[in-house]
Image (cartoon, rainbow, N blue to C red):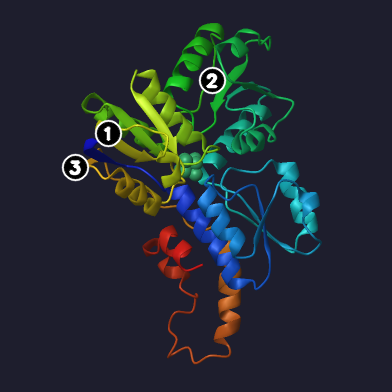
Amino acid sequence: MVNKLYLVTPRGFCAGVEMAIKALHWLLKIYDETIYCYHEIVHNKWIVKEFEKNNVIFVEDPSEIPEGSIVMLSAHGTAPNVEEQFNSISSVTINSVCPLVTKVHHEAKKFTSSNTQIIYVGHKDHDEAKGALGVSPDNMHLVEDINDVKSLDIGDNVALLAQTTLALSEWEPIMEFSKDKFSNLKMPRKSDLCYATTNRQEAILAILPKVESVVVVGSENSSNTKALVSMVQNKGVSANRVDNVRDLENINLKGTVAVTAGASAPDHIVYEIIEKINPSSLEYFELKQEVEYFPLPQQLRKNIRLISDFLNNFNDSENNPDTTLGISNDKEWTATEALNSL
Ligand code: SF4
């Protein structure tokens, strides 16, 4: 029996996930054909299934797409050579990489151009790490823990970069150890760990003293979701990741519980889970509000405008004043609404 449930904010969709979902929705809207998406658009099972039901095929390699197809590259970032391969096969490729992942790619290019060796802290099999390491494969060294850093023999002209979705508890010990090992260690001025990852972790840490356990909503391959779970467990508090209501079946929740969600988890699943838990009381805990907004990819906006101009040549534009098919209102329109309208 759960007496009290705290629903934590910030949780769920970040600005990068919002942008990527809306971008894929736009591709479906303007091209009446199958869209091929490199990697899962975001790491959430439910969202991937919804897009699959609506004529999106997710692929893991450019060889899987037919000549002349329409392609979207996922929010996690794509290695430059892979993007080139997609460009050479597709008729249109839209890159919906999150700008905060692009920032890490830029840093990798900058350090490589000054012959600096790069330590990249990340998870070996994660899409984001694969994309980032592809920026400079000969110069970048993936590390997952302190032992990996210990075994590096790469001189002293070294920089440290990170996957955006690491747990603070994963990142900080590796950063401190690397600073000790490499006396001239270079780092970006602003942390690579993104605002959404950090905010969700800080919010759950703030409520932790009041709860006996935590439920984190999100899919198994969502790195920031797993980071939330491990942060909580490292503090000695029980934490369970659930993708949907069914995952609650084997979990015995009691007392006071907090619920949060990774950056790619839809909020309707959070509310289904709360309904299933059926707490005696529900309290909202908001650490801070997020106002970040990332515009749709530039190439997509350009394509929408071209199509819209073409259509407006056949329409009475005075009676149809929105000449951009609604794209000018993108900031007011949410990924949840995009998913609902699929
Ligand atoms: S979790 Fe961070 S890096 Fe990843 S898409 Fe969201 S804002 Fe971008």
Q: Residue at image x 24%, y 28%?
A: 211
The residue at which mark 3 appears reads as 280
What is the three-letter code of the residue carrying label 2? Lys
Q: Nearer the viewer, mark 3 or mark 2?
A: 3
User: Which residue is depicted at the point 57% across and 80% down?
Assistant: 309
Location of residue 329 by image quarter = bottom left
- In this rendered view, identify the residue nearer to me: 316 or 56: 56
Provide the secondary structure element on which disc 3 rests: loop
Relative to residue 8, is residue 190 drawn left or right?
right
Residue at numbered disc 2: 186
Q: Is residue 244 visible?
A: no
Q: Is residue 126 left or right of residue 249?
A: right
Q: Amino acid at mark 1?
A: Val
- Where residue 94 appears, as percent x and y from the top left, is 63, 57
The x, y position of residue 196, in whole percent, is: 40, 39
In the image, residue 61 lies at what x, y percent?
A: 75, 46
The residue at which mark 1 appears reads as 257
Say few, some or many: other residues with alpha carbon within 10 Å of mark 1 (under 14 / 14 to 19 / 20 or more).
many
Q: Quadrant of residue 50?
A: bottom right
Residue 197 seen in render: yes
* Mark 1 element type: strand
